[in-house]
Image (tube, rainbow, N blue to C red):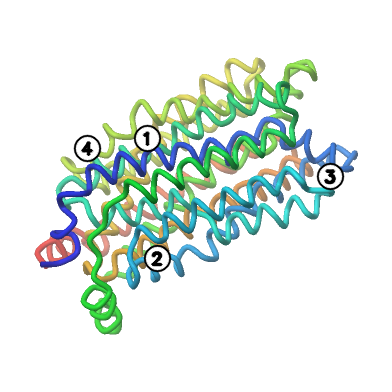
């Protein structure tokens, strides 16, 4: 009996816990968005262009770290089990999040954010666990539900970040976040169940790794990983500097933080409404159709965001964009799982996390540089064009490499 069959009785319970843990950790990570430029200023950076660029670097550092280590954690999950990776991520993030509240300058802020990414990644570990335990025919729905938990955290986080600093101060907010993640760590340790045999699962995976390659699959896998990167790039290209954009729209300084939180929450709210539904749709009509359609729609929705005149218009458009983005990651994870052998699932889903977090690194950097040197409006236009180009690439890969026979063959393994 393989790993998925042995854990079939646990995956629903583990899904519920992973949804809670992903929600909690993402609240803690995203709640700094509304006040990140303010914290950068508090740490001694005064020039506006420097604030924009340092905000992008500080925000992207966590995701750069996660992109570097996600494949390693995926391999270790294949070898030693998925639960240890969840526990490691939660404990590490709880400690580092609290230390960020003690940063003395912007360099320490960036360094601690980088460390958080290197040793953290609870949501990534959760995707690996659920992606390897859930039955294949329910993979789209389950990963959509898990995505909803993470997206809910991204929704609540900026809202919390909009008012919590007024109650406990900016530094105190990080201590609150660290405590929240610690709670998730305790629940994960006590409640997550996993039947993992290191002797059979770990050693067999090691032996089979050298024989799991199929050169005909690499264009499909590569296209899916690039698409995953683009999903996060599209969402994050403007968010680290959105407070500056809100100010450009004429919002008073003392209202910028909470309004930025509302605008940021718009995309997460839209995604919550459609993530599970689009994941189930991918189970019915195929992941490729969902991916291509969502990319085109998201690219179109990016354009009017460059020409808004009121902050509420931006919030509404971000909500619509969240609805179209939501179907992408569950469909991508589903197709990747079906495109590789069972014993390589954790490793490949680790690469998926690297691709996503690479997008979260590149997005803020692109947004920061274009926003500082060309203009904030162009961030939306460039991102929209990249999404449409990505849709064209996916359509070409789907037709050229005829992915469905590969998927069917792997399902029959």
Q: Residues within 10 Å of mark 3 (few under 14, many from 20)?
A: some
In front here: 267 or 124? 124
What residue would you read off at disc 4? 280
Residue in the image at 24% along x and 40% along y: 141
What residue would you read off at disc 2? 74
Q: Secondary structure at mark 2?
A: helix
In the rendered structure, which disc, 4 or 1, sits on the residue that comes first in sequence? 1
Distance in Å between CA atoms under marks 1 and 3: 34 Å
Q: Secondary structure at mark 1?
A: helix
User: Relative to 212, is 13 above or below?
Assistant: above
Q: Would you say the residues marked 2 and 1 are in contact, meaning their CB atoms lie under 8 Å apart?
A: no
Residue in the image at 39% along x and 48% along y: 188
Q: Which mark is residue 50?
A: 3
Judged by depth in the image, the label closer to the viewer, 4 or 1, is 1
In the rendered structure, which disc, 2 or 1, sits on the residue that comes first in sequence? 2
Judged by depth in the image, the label closer to the viewer, 4 or 2, is 2
Name the spot of residue 391 as percent of width and height, x first: 39, 47
Judged by depth in the image, the label closer to the viewer, 2 or 3, is 2
What residue would you read off at disc 1? 148
Distance in Å between CA atoms under marks 4 and 2: 25 Å
In the rendered structure, which disc, 2 or 3, sits on the residue that comes first in sequence? 3
Distance in Å between CA atoms under marks 4 and 3: 44 Å
Q: Secondary structure at mark 4?
A: helix
Distance in Å between CA atoms under marks 4 and 1: 13 Å
Quarter of image, res 40: top right
Q: Which mark is residue 102?
A: none
Distance in Å between CA atoms under marks 2 and 1: 22 Å
Name the spot of residue 403 as percent of width and height, x first: 22, 60
In the image: residue 99, left or right of residue 395? right
In the rendered structure, which disc, 1 or 3, sits on the residue that comes first in sequence? 3
């Amino acid at each position: 009996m393989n790993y998925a069959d042995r854990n079939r009785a646990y995956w629903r319970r583990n899904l519920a816990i992973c949804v809670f843990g992903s929600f909690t950790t993402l609240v803690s990570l995203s709640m700094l968005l509304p006040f990140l430029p303010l914290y950068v200023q508090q740490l001694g950076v005064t020039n506006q262009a420097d604030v924009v660029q340092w905000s992008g670097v500080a925000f992207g550092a966590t995701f750069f770290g996660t992109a570097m280590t996600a494949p390693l954690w995926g391999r270790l999950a294949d070898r030693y089990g998925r639960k240890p990776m969840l526990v490691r991520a939660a404990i590490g993030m709880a400690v580092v999040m609290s230390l960020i509240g003690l940063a003395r300058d912007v360099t320490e802020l960036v360094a601690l954010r980088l460390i958080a990414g290197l040793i953290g990644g609870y949501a990534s570990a959760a995707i690996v666990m659920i992606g390897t335990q859930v039955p294949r025919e329910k993979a789209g729905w389950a990963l959509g539900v898990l995505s909803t938990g993470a997206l809910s955290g991204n929704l609540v986080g900026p809202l919390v970040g909009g008012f919590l600093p007024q109650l406990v101060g900016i530094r105190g907010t990080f201590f609150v976040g660290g405590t929240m993640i610690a709670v998730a760590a305790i629940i994960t340790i006590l409640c997550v169940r996993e039947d993992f045999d290191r002797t059979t699962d770990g050693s067999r995976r090691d032996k089979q790794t050298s024989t799991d390659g199929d050169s005909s699959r690499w264009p499909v896998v590569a296209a899916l990983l690039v698409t995953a990167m683009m999903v996060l790039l599209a969402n994050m290209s403007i968010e680290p500097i959105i407070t500056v954009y809100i100010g450009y729209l004429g919002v008073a300084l003392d209202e910028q933080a909470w309004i930025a939180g509302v605008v940021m929450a718009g995309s997460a709210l839209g995604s919550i409404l459609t993530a599970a539904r689009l994941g189930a749709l991918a189970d019915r009509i195929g992941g490729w159709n969902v991916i291509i359609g969502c990319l085109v729609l998201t690219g179109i929705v990016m354009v009017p965001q460059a020409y808004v005149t009121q902050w509420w218009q931006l919030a509404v458009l971000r909500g619509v964009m969240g609805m179209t983005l939501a179907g992408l990651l569950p469909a991508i994870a589903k197709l990747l799982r079906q495109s590789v052998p069972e014993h390589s699932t954790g490793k490949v889903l680790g690469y998926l996390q690297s691709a996503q977090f690479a997008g979260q690194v590149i997005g803020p950097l692109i947004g920061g540089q274009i926003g500082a040197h060309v203009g904030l409006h162009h961030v939306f236009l460039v991102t929209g064009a990249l999404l449409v180009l990505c849709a064209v690439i996916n359509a070409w890969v789907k037709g050229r490499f005829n992915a469905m026979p590969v998927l069917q063959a792997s399902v029959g393994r």
